[in-house]
């Protein structure tokens, strides 16, 4: 159900939050949806089921604008991205159906557990890469068949996460792309491309089974669009590939922190 909630003064903080999330989301390839769910539920007391669908609505502008920005800077592995996105569509439909039968506590706890598990996976892969670099060895990017299997598995998982939690689902995509030894700048751009497809698919699925608060969407997107436009331009000026290990590490640690917070809150 699509509706407008009554205005509250605390909503005046949403454009600023949207700008920060849009800026970070377009830079790290996540679309920002991962941050919207905790923000809406913990700071603005929005019901999780409504926050999921509203998060998807507000994330779409970040994804579309951010993806175009990365495309202009040549940061897309289009074939791999399409494979991830195709699998993600099926996951998004499944996730949108699943969230309707989950309780508030189950939804929050599941999101926290997911965040911790996928972040741990990213930290382990990052550690393996550091060890390989220290030993002077190069990790294999995998065969075509292995990469296709990764695209299907991680793509479906990303779509499932997007449809269920209203987040970007970027972590599984990034985890899969990192194992293919792709440069970080291309990983970020391609991830945002996949997130765009998953978010749009999940949004249409939630219009059938979920609740979308357009009042929240208006306030959020007024800031997210500006942030999404600025993100790729800022990233183009940063030598991001030189600091890819640190980016992965701190991103994963941030996910763990959010995951623990959602479990205990």
Image: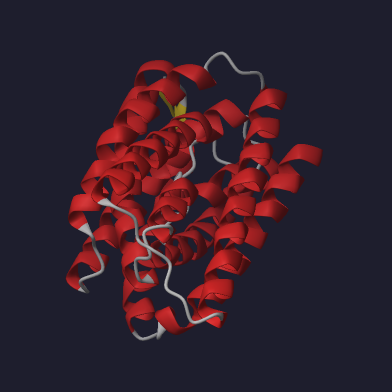
Image point 41% across, 49% down: which residue? 173
- Nearer to me, 195 or 56: 195
User: Would you identify the image quadrant in which residue 122 lies?
Assistant: bottom right
Considering only vertical position in the picture, is 125 above or below 199? below
Q: Is residue 74 left or right of residue 51?
A: left
Q: Is residue 163 visible?
A: yes
Considering only vertical position in the picture, is 61 above or below 163? below
Toward the right, the furthest residue is 264
Q: Which quadrant is home to the C terminus?
A: top right
- Nearer to me, 102 or 46: 102
Q: How many marks?
A: 0
Q: Is residue 259 left or right of residue 125?
A: right
What coloring was used for the rendering? secondary structure
- In percent of width and height, residue 264 lies at 81, 40
- Nearer to me, 191 or 135: 135
Q: In this view, does 97 lie to the left or right of 60?
A: right
- In percent of width and height, residue 128 lies at 57, 65
- In percent of width and height, residue 140 lies at 38, 63
Image point 62% across, 35% down: which residue? 46
- In percent of width and height, residue 35 lies at 56, 51
User: Would you identify the image quadrant in which residue 127 lies?
Assistant: bottom right
Q: In this view, does 179 lie to the left or right of 245?
A: left
- Nearer to me, 234 or 71: 71
Q: Is residue 196 visible?
A: no
Image point 44% across, 35% down: which residue? 157
Image point 59% across, 51% down: which residue? 121
Toward the top, the furthest residue is 101
Q: Which quadrant is home to the N terminus?
A: top left
């Amino acid at each position: 159900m699509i509706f407008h909630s009554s205005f509250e003064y605390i909503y005046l903080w949403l454009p600023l939050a949207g700008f920060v999330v849009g800026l970070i989301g377009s830079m790290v390839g996540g679309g920002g949806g991962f941050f919207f769910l905790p923000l809406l539920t913990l700071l603005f007391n929005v019901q999780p089921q409504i926050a999921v669908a509203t998060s998807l609505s507000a994330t779409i502008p970040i994804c579309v604008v951010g993806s175009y920005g990365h495309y202009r800077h040549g940061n897309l592995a289009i074939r791999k991205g399409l494979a991830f996105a195709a699998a993600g569509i099926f996951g998004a439909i499944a996730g949108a159906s699943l969230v309707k039968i989950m309780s508030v506590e189950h939804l929050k706890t599941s999101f926290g557990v997911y965040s911790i598990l996928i972040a741990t996976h990213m930290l382990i892969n990052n550690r393996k890469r550091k060890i390989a670099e220290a030993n002077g060895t190069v990790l294999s990017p995998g065969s075509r068949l292995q990469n296709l299997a990764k695209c299907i598995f991680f793509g479906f998982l990303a779509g499932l996460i997007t449809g269920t939690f209203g987040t970007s689902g970027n972590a599984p995509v990034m985890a899969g792309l990192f194992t293919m030894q792709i440069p970080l700048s291309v990983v970020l751009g391609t991830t945002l491309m996949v997130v765009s497809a998953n978010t749009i698919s999940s949004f249409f699925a939630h219009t059938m089974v979920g609740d979308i608060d357009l009042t929240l969407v208006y306030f959020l997107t007024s800031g997210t669009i500006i942030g999404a436009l600025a993100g790729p331009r800022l990233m183009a000026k940063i030598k991001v590939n030189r600091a890819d290990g640190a980016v992965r590490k701190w991103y994963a640690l941030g996910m763990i922190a959010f995951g623990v917070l959602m479990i205990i809150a």
